[in-house]
Image (cartoon, grey):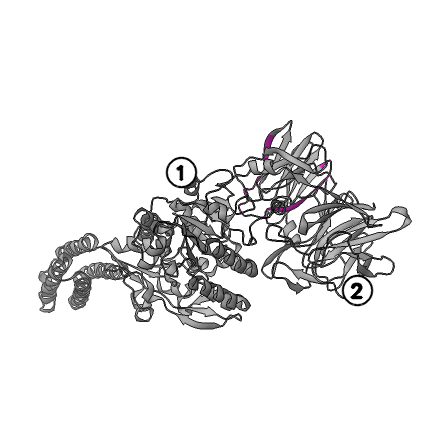
Amino acid sequence: MRRAQKQQAEELLRQMQEAQEQIKKFIEQGRTLSAAELLEECQNGGITIGTLIEKTEGDGHPAVLLLEEYCELAYQIHEKLVNGSGREINSNKISKLLRQKLIKVENSLKNDIHVRIEAVFLPYKASMWDSLESVWKAADADEYCDTYVIPIPYYDKNPDGSFQKMHDESSQYPAYVPVTKYDTFDFGEHRPDMVFIHNPYDNANFVTSVHPFFYSENLKKFTDCLVYIPYYATTGGMADGQSLCPAYLNADYIVIQSQKYRKFFDSRIPDDKFLALGSPKFDSVIHKCQNPPELPPEWKDKMTGRKVYFYNTSIGGMLANTDGFLQKMRYVFDTFRGRDDVCLLWRPHPLMDSSFDSMRRQYKAQYDALKREYAAHDIGILDETPDIENAIAVSDAYIGDSATSVTSLFGAAGKPLFILNNHINTLPEKDDWRGEWLLPQFDIWGNDKYMVTKNNQLWISENCDYHYKFYMDLGGGYSGGEYYLIAVEIGSRVYVLPRNARHILVIENQKLRRIDFREDYTRAGAFYDCYYNQKYIFLLPYRYPHLVRFDVETEQVSYLTGIGQVHVRNINGEWSRGGVAPYGNELAFASPADNQFLFVDMDTLRVRTLACNVKRYTGTLVAVPEHDNLWLLPMRGTTVTCWNPETGDVAEYSGVPQDFRSVRWPEEIECDEKPFGNISFSYEGGKETIVLSPCWGNMYLSLDRDSGTMEEWKIPIASAKRGKNGYFVSTYMGCFADMYAAQGKAHHLMWNDPDRKLYDVNIDTKEYKEISIEMDYDDLRSHMPGFAEVSEWMQYCLDESAFQTLGDFIGNRITGNQFDRERQAEIFGKINANTDGTCGRTVYHTVKKRLQERFYD
């Protein structure tokens, strides 16, 4: 019997109890006909309940027999009343007899009839069924639960958001899963107790949409318990786009992998919605790796005697840099082509074709050609089956993108992960390692004695000549994640400042200590830069909720909230931040979207608001102080503004050369965004030189303050716009490295990003000399981490680099730590609340218990 049916029976019993009390009163008042009429109603109620029980529980149920006895007693009393012999009836005795019979019925209804639960599972992609399957299995094993698996149709979307072809994958589920067609199930009639979904987007996905009937808002009309289980698993982080989806607002419960992931969801979602029980996706992987499936014959021929590498191509990797993604595919195919000791098992994301059609249509032909070549040249196995766990179970290792749930499945399975860099599509040449490791964050005052490397190590140039050697590991246990931005020396101490860490490191006498911040911010991108003087260090927030000020003398940490409301904005779905500049004893924070500025007093942290009186201002990318002025380099357009915040005076300079262009990386699309990177001045020798360096622009420009003209300032060094290969990834030409130290002087440090070289340039005469930045190759190689815990957002793996090529991984020529299965299991166990393969069972029984508590306790 369903819960609603039992509630109906219980309600009828309650009405019958009330009627019996009234029957007693009627008899005492001598109103026997009224009492007889109520007895008829009680009989009818008993018949209705009995019919309902027989329909749901079958014939001969104890409760039905008791109801029959009750109805017989009611009939006998009724006959006495209508035949005029009611004066002989004792109302107390009759009431007691009826009550005793009804109590027996009530007890039988309570104890002999189990409520049957109806659980409906609504997958839309057969390949994502693994996120629901183990929950369904637990429900199906419950003798008091009726389950329905109803694959729901979905549509591909056109670029304008309209629907394309409808897909129904009902036929793609395993044979042991009984599938109900979506158009044969009446939700209004069934009103299921639980509905489980794994698509949270409703109409908010750019690539696909489930049928509108199955949007979460509509489903909630038919059930008291809507449960969202993510279709993905994670290795530690979550994308911004997952923080608030339509289904979260309508779901009663949201299953999360562990409690730490609550912080990634929007704070407006009530905490009691979250069930930190693990991910059901892991259950199937764990079980299938313990009991590998039988291989299809065509797979078996290619795998036998070979090590199998699972190649995952994700939508995120494709969208981030489509051209690089396609070149990477060819590089991977070429690496495996013709080898008889290894087998490549390529599994594209199930929505890859749809994503190309809707979001990268101009590249679809190239992708299709690569796909055909892969098959035609028999490079490996193309897996487009709906069951990813089978492929994981028969694979030996993972290669592919990092930002995909497949990495977490391999991590749980205890198999090594090799994370590809989609920019790399050639083997490294001599010194290509420089492209990856010479990425210094230059000191604004010109003191570049220390350099923080991307693997969280500190290197030192003892003679301040840019020749670096290893100094110390910065701790924390992570080999990547860009936790630190720069190390600055103030007095006798060195302060290592965070980019993604939530603390400052202090080094004194080669001893390291840590000063933690008050808020444990979990997302990447906490800080983007810093400003410091001899008194304070300011950490400039990107996604961190506060501006952080560190007092060098007292080591007190102060926080100022609200800077991001002006300074960091989400513009057309992308986070942008404005420029920052010291102005007297204040820091000026610019908006990236308009003419608003916040001026923060460095001592008191008091804030004042100003607006630059320029019409149609598009925001400030970079702000640079010059005397009483701030030079504002635009977020959009090519108009440079010189503004005096005290007087309000403004001078605007435009008219860039005709062949000046801004080019967005990596798409290489011409745009009007981020043309300039910074501006430098020289007043030596009685002349003024003003030079603008590019951000996305294609040239340096000189600016004449008096005439307002801008001309190309031809730099005396190489002028490549991009690096020579994927090891030298470069989004801009270069910049002036000593931003504040050299202002007003002729000599400036110029960083040429495409070839990772530093120059001392006289901007008046254009005389220059290279300043060689050196790191000892053997020293660097000896400090390569190898397999390690990379960050909070990417667990134990090996990253592709000039020191760790794909060929090295396949050939087991790994620099640094070798793969440690036990270490991997320990690390991945920290990010999943359930590691024994019973998550689905736990989810089902937890939801069932919550449901019972809501309606029966």
Q: Residue at x 39, y 44 (%)?
A: 414
The kind of residue tagged 2 is: Gly
Q: Position of residue 506 (x, y in %)?
A: 63, 33
Count up the numbered dots: 2
Asked whether, in this view, residue 664 is left or right of residue 844, the answer is right
Residue 193 visible in the shown view: no
The kind of residue tagged 1 is: Glu
Q: Residue at x 78, y 64 (%)?
A: 657
- Spatial CA span between label 1 and label 2: 63 Å
Answer above or below: position of 59 versus 409.
below
Residue 822 - label: 1
- Camera-side residue: 819 or 614? 819
Asked whether, in this view, residue 283 is left or right of residue 555, the answer is left
* Residue 682: in magenta span: no
Which mark lies nearer to you, 1 or 2? 1
Asked whether, in this view, residue 115 is left or right of residue 133, the answer is left
Q: Secondary structure at mark 2?
A: loop
Q: Residue at x 53, y 60 (%)?
A: 326
Residue 3 visible in the shown view: yes
Q: Position of residue 172 (x, y in %)?
A: 33, 64
- Provide the residue span drawn in magenta: 512-535
Answer above or below: position of 472 versus 418.
above
- Camera-side residue: 721 or 851? 721
User: For mark 1, does the 10 Å Cα neighbourhood hold few (<14), some (14 to 19), or many (20 or more) residues?
Assistant: few
* Residue 514: in magenta span: yes
Residue denoted by label 2: 655
